[in-house]
Image (cartoon, rainbow, N blue to C red):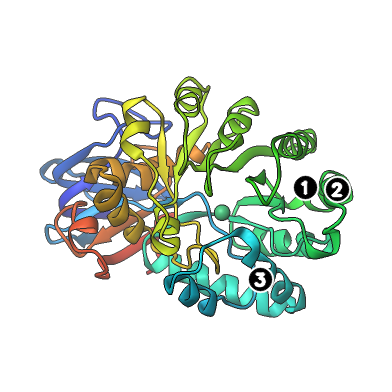
Amino acid sequence: MLITNIGELVTNAPRDAVSVASPGPFDAIADAAVVMDAGLVVWTGPASQAPAADELVDAGGRAVLPGFVDSHAHLVFAGERGDEFAARMAGLPYSAGGIRSTVAATRAASDAELRANLAKLGREMLTQGTTTFECKSGYGLTVPDEARSLALAAEVTAEVTYLGAHVVPPEFDDAAAGYVDLVCGDMLAACAQYARWVDVFCERGAFGPDEARAVLRAGESAGLQARVHANQLGPGPGVQVAVEAEAASADHCTFLSDADVDALASSGGTVATLLPAVEFSTRQPYPEARRLLAAGVTVAIASDCNPGSSFTSSMPLCVALAVREMRMTTTEAVWAATAGGAHALRRSDVGHLGVGARADVIMLDAPSHSYLAYRPGVPLIAAVWRDGVQVA
Ligand SMILES: [Zn+2]
């Protein structure tokens, strides 16, 4: 299938490469075309040189981009926390404590209810251009509830993350060490089969550095790769723990010391995943993206879609916030929301449109990627293809 007459084709792929195995820097071709076959990108270039194809889509001068890669989302839950949000907007502070109300609702929900909510959110993401998303557990916090959360997540994505170490559940209030043992023991044993990743909320009020290291080590010994919730609510050891563990990503990075920035910059591939919709929804200061970019850190943007601190599934909103509030350029923000997310998930097949990439493609109802920030809040996703099949 050929999409031609594309005003701007964002490829994130080096132009002179014959075949591209992983995302490159931001790059875009004007007056372009893309050919997809058998679920893969097989050709990109100037529209005037496009090969013939069985099926043709005329983009009419609109922009075409890789689908968004949302590398951080908590989608397996029941209930909602609209009142908590309203109270926060009225001046109450955010703390991780509200997670417990979602835990209670999730435990009480049937599989069918959780599955329906997950499907609804997945569909919402897709229609907003997200073609790859990560999904965490973390609202079950018992062995059976974490295992079923991950089994349900595995029905909708390959990027499944075990987050038994989200918060200490109420029944372990006086025995946090016992809960860490459970997370590293029986719970992990029941969960590892469904997950690719292990994550820990390393933060005051959640898990300390030694507990976080224990969780990541246990996960790795069960074949899971590390990622860390780090430095969201204040300065802390999360980023250092993530880099030490060679985590794929340290997520949030809102409060960073110079040593944290240096550690990320000199890490062997720990991405700083920024979640600006959290700061938007909790009225915290935004992460200092420019400081990270200046240091050479690889930056991703993700939604952190969850019912407490960021109940948006919209990557276009996150791009707009990254540009307006974190002073990223439009190209940096779009790269971070596509190729950056792919790096954060250690995926070479998504986040770019080089030859050989998955044909996960979005068309904007706009001539340029910059409209994602220039026209915030406007539904700009005109069409979505996943694996070469139009799905929205
Ligand atoms: Zn999160």
- Residue 372 spot, x, y in % from top left: 24, 57
Q: Which residue is mark 1?
A: 192
* Among the two numbered marks 1 and 3 on one chain, the one whose residue lies closer to the N terminus: 3
Other-residue count near label 3 (Cα within 10 Å), few / some / many at <14 / 14–19 / ≥20: many
What is the CA distance from the residue labelled 1 to the residue labelled 3? 23 Å
Q: Which residue is mark 3?
A: 102
Which secondary structure lies at badge 2?
helix
Which secondary structure lies at badge 1?
helix
1 and 3 marks in contact (CB < 8 Å): no
Ligand 1 within 8 Å of the CB at mark 1: no
1 and 2 marks in contact (CB < 8 Å): yes
Q: Which residue is mark 2?
A: 189
Which residue occupies the foreground of this view, 135 or 107? 107
Other-residue count near label 1 (Cα within 10 Å), few / some / many at <14 / 14–19 / ≥20: many
Residue type beneath disc 2: Ala
Disc marking residue 208: none
* Among the two numbered marks 3 and 2 on one chain, the one whose residue lies closer to the N terminus: 3
Q: Is residue 99 left or right of residue 185?
A: left
Q: Is residue 73 left or right of residue 221?
A: left
Q: Is residue 196 above or below residue 361?
A: above
Residue drawn where x is 87% and y is 53% of the image? 175
- Residue 383 spot, x, y in % from top left: 30, 65
Q: Is residue 372 left or right of residue 60?
A: right
